[in-house]
Structure formats: C-alpha cells, structure tokens
C-alpha cells in the first residue's frame, strides 16, 4: 500500500483483499506455482483499525461525537 493514502483509501484496498480471499480462497496452486493470500483474520483486524482512523480523520479532534455545551446561569 502507498504510505500517502488516506485511511479511507486503505479501507477500500483491504476490502478488495478480503473479497479476494473470500471468493478465491486463502491459497491455491496452479501447476508448480502456489499463491497464499493474506490471513483473513489479520485483514479484518487491519480493516477495523483503518475504519476507526478514517472516522477520526473525518470527524477530527481527539473525542469524536463530542460537543461543547455552554450553559449560561439563569
């Protein structure tokens, strides 16, 4: 993955990798060559982490879904 990609762009790449594993299997062999894809559990953990980063990037700040309220005395 490109280091300059945003977390939301990386989520899309991880989704594609997960789809490849789910549709084509974890590993396969063609003749004398074998291909093993990334571990599905690791991909899912990475996706979860990147999705959280993407939300943080979108919302901004240290505490997402937090608002400041100002109460004036009555």
Image (spheres, helix red, strand yellow):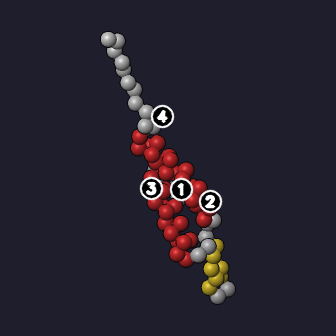
Residue named by callout 1: 47
**Image coordinates for residue 64, horizontal then vertical, percent:** 45, 37
* Numbered badge on residue 64: none
Q: Which numbered circle lies on residue 42? A: 2
How far apart, in angstroms, are the residues tagged by discs 2 and 1?
8 Å
Can I make out residue 4 in this image?
no
State which tag comes first along the sequence, 4 or 3: 3
Q: Secondary structure at mark 1?
A: helix
> Does residue 33 appear left or right of residue 7 in this picture?
right
Report x, y in % for residue 46. 57, 55
Q: Marks 3 and 2: in contact by CB < 8 Å? A: no
Q: Residues within 10 Å of mark 4 (few under 14, many from 20)?
A: few
Q: Tag 3 or tag 1, which sits nearer the N-term? A: 3
Residue located 44% across and 53% down the image: 8
Q: Closer to the observer: label 4 or label 3?
A: 4
Q: Position of residue 7 (x, y in %)?
A: 48, 51
Q: Nearer the viewer, residue 25 or 3?
A: 25
| Mark 1 → mark 3, Cα distance in angstroms | 11 Å
CA–CA distance in space, label 4 to label 1: 21 Å
With 31 as the anchor, is 15 left or right in this view? left
* Cα–Cα span, label 4 and label 3: 22 Å
Between the C-alphas of marks 4 and 2, the distance is 27 Å
Q: Earlier in the sequence, mark 2 or mark 3?
A: 3
> Considering depth in this image, is 65 or 47 the residue closer to the camera?
65
Sequence-wise, the earlier of marks 4 and 1 is: 1
Residue under numbered circle 4 = 63
**Mark 3 crowdedness (10 Å alpha carbons): few <14, some 14-19, many ≥20:** some
Residue furthest front as drawn: 74
Nearest to N terminus: mark 2 or mark 1: 2
Mark toward the viewer: 1 or 3: 1
Are the two marked residues, 4 and 1, in contact with CB atoms closer than 8 angstroms? Answer: no
């Amino acid at each position: 993955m490109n280091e300059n990609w945003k977390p939301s762009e990386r989520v899309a790449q991880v989704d594609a990798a997960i789809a490849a594993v789910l549709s084509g299997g974890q590993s396969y062999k063609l003749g004398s060559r074998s291909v093993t894809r990334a571990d599905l559990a690791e991909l899912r953990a990475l996706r979860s982490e990147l999705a959280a980063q993407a939300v943080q990037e979108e919302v901004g700040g240290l505490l997402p879904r937090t608002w400041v309220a100002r109460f004036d005395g009555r």
